[in-house]
Amino acid sequence: MISLLVAESKRFWARRITRFFPLIVAFLMAGGVAIALMVIGTDEGPDFVQDIGGGIEATSILGPVANLLPIMAFVLGASFVGADLKSGMIEQILTWEPRRFRVVAARSVASFTGTAVLASVLAALLVGLLYVLAAVTGSIEGTTTEFWVNALGAVVRTGISVGLFSLIGLGLTLLVNSSTGSIVSFLIYWFVVESFLLSAFLPRIWAWAPVTNAASFASGADVQRIDGSPFRGDFDIIVDHGYLTAGLVLGGWSLLSLGLGSVWFSARDVS
C-alpha cells in the first residue's frame, strides 16, 4: 500500500494541470495586488487588520480566493480520475479486482494532501501580498502575535477545506464516470443551486450545504442564515452553527461523495 501511495503521489505532482492551475491562481493574485498598488494612493489603502483581516475574532483575509481554490481542488481531484477515463487506463484498473479499493484510497490520500499543500501555499502567498499592499498604501498596525496565529489557522483550515473539495471531485467523477460531467455539475450546483436557490428559498438546507460550510470553516466564522421572509422584510439573521461544526459537515460531504464513488467503482464491470 505504501508503494502504491508513493506512486500515486508522484503521478499527482507530475501532471501538468497540478503545476499550471496553481500558477494561474498565483498570477491572478499577484496581478490583482499589482493593479491595486497602481490605483490606490499612499495613505488611502486598506487597514490590514480591520479591512482585510476582518479583525482578530474572524480572520477573513482569504475571502478573495474563496471561489478559485475550491474550484481548483475539485478540478484536480476530478481530473486525477478523468485522465484515466480518457486514456483507457481505467479499464486496466478495473481488471485489478482485489486492489480497486486500495487504488482509490491511494489516489484520495494523494489528492487530498497535494491540493491541501497547494491551497495552503497560495493562501499564505495571498496573506503576504495583501500585507505588502497594506504596508505600502495603508496601515499594518495591529498585526499582533495573536492576529498572526489566527491568520495561520485560517491558512491551514483553507488547505484542509480545499483538500476535502478534491475528494468530492474525485468521488463524483468515479460515480458519474466523467470528469467533465462532474466538473460542470459542480459548477452548476455551486453558482445556481446553492448560491441562489438554496440561499434564497431554503436557508435551513443552505446552512448545511458544502460550499457554505467550507467558507465558514476556512474563515473561522459562524454559519449565519435568514430566519423568516426577506421578501416581506420580516426576517432575522441567526447563527446556525459554528465553524468547527462546518468543518465536520464539509468532511461528511466529502466522505459521502468518495464513499459512493468508491462503492460504484469497486462494483463496476469491465466494459
Image: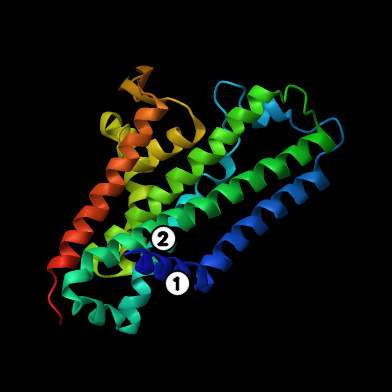
Name which residue lies at 66% across and 41% down: 127
Image quarter of residue 42? top right
Amino acid type for the residue under numbered disc 2: Ala
231, above or below 201, in the image = above
Is disc 1 surrounded by few (<14), some (14 to 19) or many (20+) residues within 10 Å?
Answer: some
Q: Which mark is residue 110?
A: 2
Q: Is residue 247 left or right of residue 153?
A: left
Name which residue lies at 32% across and 31% down: 207
Position of the N terminus, as image quadrant, is bottom left
State the residue in front, 107 or 176.
107
State the residue in front, 43 or 161.
161
- Residue 58 horizontal/vertical position (percent): 54, 25
Image quarter of residue 73? bottom left
Q: Is residue 98 left or right of residue 156?
A: left
Amino acid type for the residue under numbered disc 1: Arg
**Residue found at the far front of this picture:** 2
Is residue 229 at all visible to an observer of this figure?
no
Residue designated by label 1: 11
Q: Pointer 2 and pointer 1: residues touching (CB < 8 Å)?
A: yes
Name which residue lies at 41% across and 60% down: 110
**Residue found at the far right of this picture:** 42
Is disc 2 surrounded by few (<14), some (14 to 19) or many (20+) residues within 10 Å?
Answer: many
